[in-house]
Image (spheres, grey):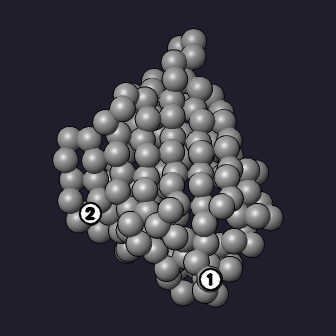
Amino acid sequence: MLEITTSTTTPLTPEQVISAAADFSDAREKLWPNSKNKYLRVHDRGAHFAEVTEGLRMIGVFWERSRYDWSEPGTIRQTIIDSNVISTRSTWELAATPQGQGSEVVMRLSREFRPSIKGRVGWVLNHLAGARMWGSYVRRALAEAEKRLG
């Protein structure tokens, strides 16, 4: 199991951070580029959860069906239900805590990759680029959210 943790700060409030992470509208692709609108399907949604399929095209389509839960204030957690790249034991979590006029944001990934070509590609990308890649990814998403809300 690969564990990656990265953190950053943002002028956004914890509520704004979680709201951006829980946005499953057509705006999602702009914030979270690994969730292309072409592959985004919301299967079920409630006040504090969503079950969605997301994907992107790399070497073919990489997709995952997940349950997102943001019932705990300041935290959103994704649990993989099915995927052609990562196993169902994989999770992603974004936690935002107040810091000054904004938030400290910590992103944690727990990834186990499937024994397939796409799983191997995911394994290599995550092991080689890891925290640097995901840190850049979350900073870019938050910068986009700041532009929208600022």
Check the picture and name the quadrant holding the N terminus. Answer: bottom right
Q: Residue under circle 1?
A: 115
Secondary structure category for the residue under label 2:
strand
- Would residue 90 appear left or right of 80 to someone viewing this image? right
The residue at the point 59 percent across, 42 percent down is 107
- Crowding at label 1, few (<14), some or many (≥20) Cα neighbours within 10 Å? few
Tally of numbered tags:
2
Query: Which dot, 2 or 1, sits closer to the camera?
Result: 1
> At which x and y percent is residue 63?
46, 74
Q: Residue under circle 2?
A: 42
- Of residues 3 and 142, the one nearer the viewer is 3
- Would residue 54 appear left or right of 86 to someone viewing this image? left
Q: Which mark is residue 37?
A: none
The residue at the point 54 percent across, 46 percent down is 141
Earlier residue among tags 2 and 1: 2
Which amino acid does the dot numbered 1 rest on? Pro
> At which x and y percent is residue 140?
60, 47
The residue at the point 52 percent across, 23 percent down is 97
